Amino acid sequence: MIFDTDILIWVQRGNEKAAKLIEKDDSRQLSIQSYMELLQGAKNKAQHKYVKDFICQFEFSILPLTENIGHRALIYVEEYTLSSSMRSGDAIIAATAVENNMKLVSSNAKHFKVVKELQLKAFKP
């Protein structure tokens, strides 16, 4: 399963339901986009280290941005930006899940529901 950035933010805020969701998954995946968003959200070196340690401790695999993912994300932006306000970061995360044939879990399901081929699991904190 691929976790959207928001799930890890919920864990950082102390949400036990999000933490249990991550703990019970044996194959924790993260798009490189989500990893970059988490690092960008760090306000200081301590938070930056916390993010890196968290990713390492829970043994997340970081999925790279490939040519196919980039191409699919571009198609999503072209197709869904005007109708559904699809942002480039969400397009990359969705494309990563689709290209790897994996389910994406997010509490921001509205950001992704327009992508028909995406296997989406909505998380309610």
Image: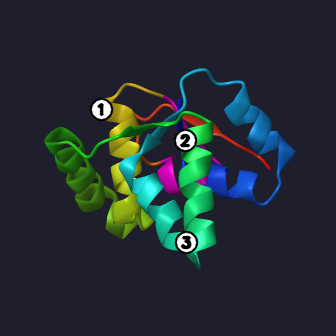
Q: Position of residue 38 (x, y in %)?
A: 52, 61
Q: Position of residue 58 (x, y in %)?
A: 62, 36
> What residue does disc 2 label?
56
Residue mark closest to the camera, 3 vs 2: 2
Quick check: 43 above or below 1?
Answer: below
Asked if residue 64 lies left or right of residue 18, the reply is: left
Q: Position of residue 25 (x, y in %)?
A: 64, 24
Quick check: 5 above or below 57?
Answer: below
Q: Which mark is residue 99?
A: 1
Give the residue at x 62% y 39%.
57
Asked if residue 95 lies left or right of residue 7, the reply is: left
Q: CA distance from mark 1 to mark 3?
A: 26 Å
Q: CA distance from mark 1 to mark 2?
A: 24 Å
Q: Is label 3 in a helix, a strand or a loop?
A: helix
Q: Is label 2 in a helix, a strand or a loop?
A: helix
Give the residue at x 82% y 41%.
17
Dot 2 alpha-carbon crowd within 10 angstroms: few under 14, some 14 to 19, many 20 or more: few
Query: Which callout, 1 or 2, points at the residue further toward the start of the chain?
Result: 2
Give the residue at x 23% y 60%.
78
